[in-house]
Each structure stands twice: as structure tokens, then as C-alpha cells.
Amino acid sequence: MLLPTPIFLLSYLLATGQNSDRTTGIGGRDGGVNLTTRRSKRRGRGSGRGGGRGYGRSSESGRSVGRKRYTREGTKKTNSVDILETRQEELSPLPPMTVPNVPRPFYFTCRHSYEHTLIDEIDRFARRNGGEVHAMSPYPGLVRVEDSDSILPTFYDPVYALQSMPQAVVVTAESIKSISKQILSALLGVGFDGDDEPTIIDQISQEQHNRLRSAERGCLSIHCLVPGMCKAQTKPVMQHRSDKVGEEMARMAKKMLPAARKLAMGENPSTRWLLQVMLQSPNIAVASLVECHEKGPGKNSFWPNYIHPLGLAKVDIVEKMPSSAYRKLMEGIECMSIAPKPNRTTVVDLGACPGGWTSVMRRLGCYVVAVDRSELDPVLMRDDMVEFIKGDAFTYEPNLAGDCWMISDVIAYPERCTELLRRWCEGRWASTMIVTMKFQGVEPDLDELDNAIQVVESLGYDCRVKHFFSNKNEVTFMVTEKDGNPLDLEVGSLGSKMYPVIL
């Protein structure tokens, strides 16, 4: 058998190398083997969709059709994430840096497209209290309020606000560590020199620092935010960077504050502190630190909301529901932080058809009396724990023993909703009521809203009203007995966190 000569081998390699040029456009990089065939047998680095790194796809003409990293002018293309972050800066007027010992701005979040309604509500409150504020919306779902006359109380709770960031500071820095230091310096009145020795900066922040140092262990929560979260985006721009800032702040805070350290087994702090940080751009952050105010009736109902970042609770149900309106009820229960007592609470659902709210209460183990002129979903009509009464929601009078809740999502004029609440409060027919008030036209009737709140409170009930993320041109009334004994809702049993919490 004759062995091939070196000249023959060299000629063969050159020929196959030219052939590989025509096949792959690589110039014999793989020793003459057809790379197109090889790539079809593997899925790794250099292959995959878009050609990946390395080879890229090629056409029959030999021209590469894979993703290119450079423009025709030879400059490197901008990453899509960088484009989004740049666009985020261009779309929003960046806030000015705050100055120590002067009134600080407030930030509120709301359901996007209702920013002007929230601004009108805040302006209305300021005028009624003899002052004036300057409110504007830098992002969808975000409102900034300049309160130079200190009109707004720290725990001001507007109906159309999902979350509050009171007395915020605005800082700027380049790196994640520097931003974290600047935030803690501005909020706690301490600075960090080369030896990390604290230096007093601001009298207001120093007082806050002293209170937080004596706070209970494990009572501090940190929410890391970005503007895209205001629209409930699943992958908002800058979220990764914001999380890293939060992690760095948590590491620093644990060295100074027992409140930032983990709870011991079985401990449950009676007070809650919340540190919120929202990146306005990669290098500018808004931050707020406050001891949360207990709103009730549940033990975990606070303002600002320390459980759910931006006040957004994920309340989706995987199974098919009679209607999507169930989310409003679940947000209301989550906000109140109480639950009906399973197998002991009877729930009256006024205007129940097609049965979205009834389905939620059945999931919570309640017996439901559903009142409507039309029948419910067939599944609910066959449920032994659902009693359907064909009738008018506004004239129905219950004759029930034991604990009773009333819920209603009936379509009616605001005045009829006020009258419905009046009848049920005067009759003392329910310990807890969750009712939506729907408005006509474009703008809400804030005067009738105030009137309904006054009616409920004058009849001995506590009342809180919110425009939740699932609400449209309507608001949700949450009414409870002043001396009631409700069942506390276990955190995470109904609604889950839409975004992670650092501490």
C-alpha cells in the first residue's frame, strides 16, 4: 500500500480549505470539514439562533447572514439594554439633587394612566388645608410632589396612590457601592470616609438614624425599585442594577443597625421600617426611609406597604374564572390583611353575576349568598355552598346569624353605592364590606367619594378607599367594624409579591 506523499497532503489541504471558504466563509478554520454539517449536530457556543458567537450562519453565496456586532462605519453596535436605559432617561425629566435640612419631595405610585387623577386629588387636599404643592408625573404610574410648605403629612394616604415614598432624597454616584453609600449618608445622617468612620451630615436624618438604631431587630425591609415596575413590567429596565444596590445597602446596614439583621426564630416585630430605593437612571436614585404607620384592620396592614413593593400584589389565579373582576376583590382583601373565617363566615355577594367574586370567597372556604337578577356560572350554580337568590341587590335585606361579610361589584351610579353602604351600616348587617364605586364619564366624582366615606365613618365603621391596579374608572371601599375581631390574613396565602424584597 502506497503512503501519500507530503506534497499530495499539502495539495489536498489547500483544496479542501478553499472549499470550506465557499461553504462557511471561515477560511479553512476547521481543517476542511464542513462546519455547516457539524453545527447541525451540536448546540453550543458558536451555534444556536442567530449564529451565536463564532461562526454565524451563512448563505449559499458564502456571505454571512448572522448577527453583526459592528456597523458599516466600523463602530460597535449599541446593546439593546443600553438603548432601553438611554430611552428611559430621555423619557423622564431627571430630578434635582436634594439639599440637607430643607423640605423633601414625596413620591407616589399609581396605576398608570391615572397620574393626573392622583395629582388632582393631591392638589385638592393641599387647597383644602390652605396650601399649595407642585405635583408632576416623570414616569407613567409615578408622581413627584414638591411640598415646600410642608402641607402633606408623612403618612398621607391618597385614594389613587398604591404606594408612598415620603420625604425622599435624591442622590447621584457612578458605582453601585457609591450609590449605596450616598443613600445611607443622606437618609441616616452618616458619611463614609476612607476608614468608614461615620460623620454627621444632616440634623433631620440624624434623628431618624437614632430612632432606627433603637428599633426592633428584623423590622427593616428594603424595596429596590425602577420606574418600569409602576406599569407592572415583568422585566423592567435597570432592575438588576437596582437589586445590586439593595444588596449592597443591606450589607452596609447590617453592620450599623440591628433592624437590618435577621429575626430570631419565632420573633415578630411590632413596628415596621421601610427603605425604598428607585433608580431614575443608572446613576441617579430616589430613596425614602420611614417607620410605617399601621392602618389595619389586619396586623400586617401598614402604610407605606412594607410587604409588596410599590403596593403591587400578584393576584392571578391559574384556573379559569367566571370573570377577571376577581382581582379587585383579592387586592382589597390583601390590602386589609384580613380574611373571612372558613366555614364560619357567610358572605353576601350583591350583583354577583357571573360569579368572579363569589369564586374567590368559595376558595376561602365561605358559604356565599349570591344576589342578582341573572344566574351565575353553571359551576357555581351547582355548588352546594352557594345559595343563589334572584333579586335586586339594592333592596335585599339579609337575615343571617353569625359573622357576615358583604361584597359588591354591582354597576350603578355613585350615589346608589353610597346609599347601599348607608343601609348596610345602619342595619349593622355585616362586620366587613368590600364595595366598588363606579364613576360615569372620564373623571371620578371626588365629592361623592368623600360623602360616602363620611357616611360610613359617621355610622361607626372604619373606612379606607383605594384605587387598585385592577380597578379602572372605579374605587374600592374597604369597611370594617371599629371593635371587630377579624382573622388576620397570612402573608402570601392570597397574593404574592410581584417583585422581590431584599430584606
Image: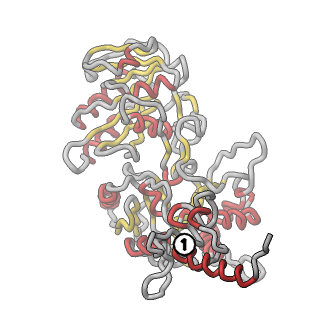
Q: Is residue 461 left or right of residue 116?
A: right
The residue drawn where x is 39% and y is 71% is 92
Work out which residue is located at the far front of the displayed protein and give it. 1
The residue drawn where x is 40% and y is 66% is 145
The x and y percentages for residue 39 are: 59, 62
**Is there any visible trace of residue 362 in the rendered image?**
yes
Q: Amino acid at mark 1?
A: Thr
Residue at the spot of label 1: 24
Work out which residue is located at the far left of the displayed protein and give it. 441
User: Residue 406 lies in what quarter of the image?
Assistant: top left
The residue drawn where x is 34% and y is 65% is 131
Badge 1 crowding class, 10 Å Cα cut-off, few under 14, some 14 to 19, many 20 or more, is: many
Where disc 1 sits, the SS reads: helix
Q: Is residue 174 above or below residue 299?
A: below
Q: How is the image coloured?
A: secondary structure
The x and y percentages for residue 455 are: 32, 35
Q: Is residue 222 above or below residue 469?
A: below
The x and y percentages for residue 115 are: 34, 58
**Is there any visible trace of residue 173 in the rendered image?**
no
The x and y percentages for residue 372 are: 29, 20
Of residue 131 and residue 302, the one placed in the foreground of this image is 302
